[in-house]
Amino acid sequence: MKNYKLIILFIATTFVMGCKKYPENRLWFKKPEKVFKNGRLTSFTVDNVDSIPLLNSTWGYDLTAESFNLNKAESSPKYNLSGAFLGDMEFANDDKRVDFSPRSKINPFPPTYDPFTTNDLWEIIKCTNKGVLKLQRTINGKTYKLQFN
């Protein structure tokens, strides 16, 4: 009988420790919109190469100056951009993906090679209680990563 209890305890521990909501951390039971209240873009990489200068020159504006703020007036939580950009960020129903769509007020015609112009969802790879949100997506074999703090 004691062996069965140990086996069940081992299986339960393995199951709980093996379940991760996001690949880079263990935020199990909280919804991402409860954790990520607002933030700024702090990192943009393409295949692990810092690409913020390229992104800024593409848009003609410093995207790290933009702030994402939770819009509590919406029925589903959305994050609105403030500054020289319009757009929003919204968590998908499964809480593991994000719809992220910035648009420039200055230049209404975004570049055609910009990763934000396609309509695929970004996968959440990290969401912490300290307000860090990391997103990732792959387009044409290139891995794009965003980080907000």
Image (cartoon, grey):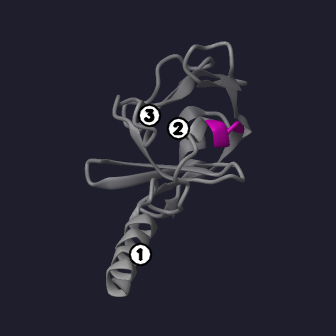
Q: Nearer the viewer, mark 2 or mark 3?
A: 3
Q: Which residue is mark 3?
A: 116
Q: Quadrant of residue 142?
A: bottom left
User: Residue at 53% of width from left, 38% of height from top?
Assistant: 58
CB of mark 2 within 8 Å of CB of mark 1?
A: no
In the rendering, at what x and y percent does residue 112 appear? 37, 30
In the rendering, at what x and y percent does residue 31 appear? 56, 40
Q: Earlier in the sequence, mark 2 or mark 1?
A: 1
In the rendering, at what x and y percent does residue 4 appear? 32, 80
Q: Amino acid at mark 1?
A: Leu
Q: Nearer the viewer, residue 124 or 104?
A: 124
User: Residue at 46% of width from left, 38% of height from top?
Assistant: 95
Which part of the image, by quadrant, shows the N terminus? bottom left
Q: Which residue is mark 2?
A: 58
Q: Nearer the viewer, mark 1 or mark 3?
A: 1
Q: Which residue is mark 1?
A: 9
Q: Say few, some or many: other residues with alpha carbon within 10 Å of mark 1 (under 14 / 14 to 19 / 20 or more).
A: few
The residues tagged by marks 1 and 3 sit, at their Cα atoms, a distance apart of 46 Å
The outermost residue toward the bottom is 3
Tell whether position 36 is magenta.
yes
User: Residue at 43% of width from left, 51% of height from top?
Assistant: 144
The residues tagged by marks 2 and 3 sit, at their Cα atoms, a distance apart of 12 Å
Residue 55 disc label: none
Magenta range: 34-38
Q: Earlier in the sequence, mark 2 or mark 3?
A: 2
In the rendering, at what x and y percent does residue 119 appear? 35, 28
Q: Secondary structure at mark 2?
A: helix
